[in-house]
């Protein structure tokens, strides 16, 4: 609630109707990423600037109990973020990519989770300490 009131992050909660418990949450923020020439080519973005607008998944977590009870909650939330980005694009503000800093410090499998969901690593923001991997998903390809 504090970060929502400070306009730092907007958090979506997914609650389980039968128990009223929070099954998962996701925070969305605005973002921009720098892409190399070849990365831009990959997305057919023929623009002279490097910085491309995006929407970032700043937080994403699924309660273990619910990920076992219902499969695919994490994927559902990513698809929901994409729908939010489409709605913004259609009416308010442009964002070409969904971005995320995949937190591999605690679980390297998170990288595979995002790859399965269509994210690829960003070359420019590659973090040498490898605690996080900056990734993007083109929401129009
Ligand atoms: C990562 C997380 C959000 C995934 O949510 P989820 O609901 O379990 O994911 P889904 O069921 O949608 O998984 C989709 C696919 O990714 C795979 N996957 C999910 N989490 C994975 C992991 N940690 N390691 C390897 N593969 C994983 C699933 O097996 C599934 O593969 P399949 O389609 O071949 O069966 C959840 O495990 C979580 O909250 N982790 C702790 C917090 C965290 O690390 N958040 C991300 C920080 S950037």
Image (tube, rainbow, N blue to C red):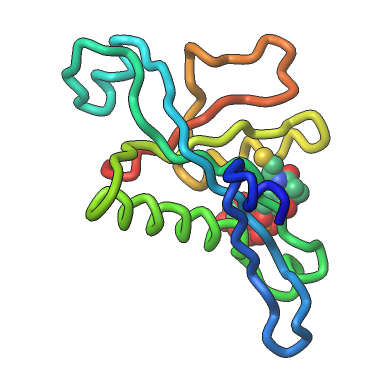
Residue 19 lies, in percent from the top left, at 78, 86
Q: Nearer the viewer, residue 26 or 128?
A: 26
Name the outermost residue toward the left: 46
Q: Quadrant of the N terminus?
A: bottom right
Q: Quadrant of residue 38?
A: top left
Q: Residue sitting at 64 percent across and 65 percent down?
A: 13
As displayed, is residue 101 above or below residue 69?
A: above
Name the outermost residue toward the front: 5
In the rendered structure, the answer to whether residue 83 lies left or right of residue 60 reads: left
In the rendered structure, the answer to whether residue 134 lies left or right of residue 51 reads: right
Q: Nearer the viewer, residue 4 or 70?
A: 4
As displayed, is residue 13 above or below residue 78?
A: below
Q: Quadrant of the C terminus?
A: top left
Q: Residue sitting at 35 percent across and 31 percent down?
A: 53
As displayed, is residue 134 above or below residue 118?
A: above
Name the outermost residue toward the bottom: 18
Residue 78 lies, in percent from the top left, at 51, 53
Q: Residue sitting at 24 percent across and 19 percent down?
A: 41
Q: Quadrant of residue 128?
A: top right
As displayed, is residue 64 above or below residue 97?
A: below
Residue 72 lies, in percent from the top left, at 60, 64
Residue 136 lies, in percent from the top left, at 46, 33
Q: Quadrant of residue 102?
A: top right
């Amino acid at each position: 609630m504090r970060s929502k009131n400070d306009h730092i992050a907007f958090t979506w909660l997914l609650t389980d109707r039968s128990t009223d418990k929070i099954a998962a949450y996701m925070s969305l923020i605005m973002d921009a990423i720098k892409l190399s020439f070849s990365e831009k080519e990959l997305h057919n973005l023929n623009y002279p600037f490097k910085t491309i607008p995006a929407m970032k998944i700043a937080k994403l977590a699924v309660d273990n109990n619910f990920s076992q009870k219902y499969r695919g909650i994490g994927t559902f939330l990513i698809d929901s973020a994409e729908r939010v980005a489409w709605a913004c694009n259609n009416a308010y503000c442009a964002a070409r990519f969904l971005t995320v800093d995949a937190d591999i410090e605690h679980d390297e499998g998170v990288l595979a989770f995002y790859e399965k969901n269509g994210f690829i690593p960003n070359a420019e923001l590659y973090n040498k300490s490898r605690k996080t991997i900056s990734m993007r998903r083109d929401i129009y390809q």
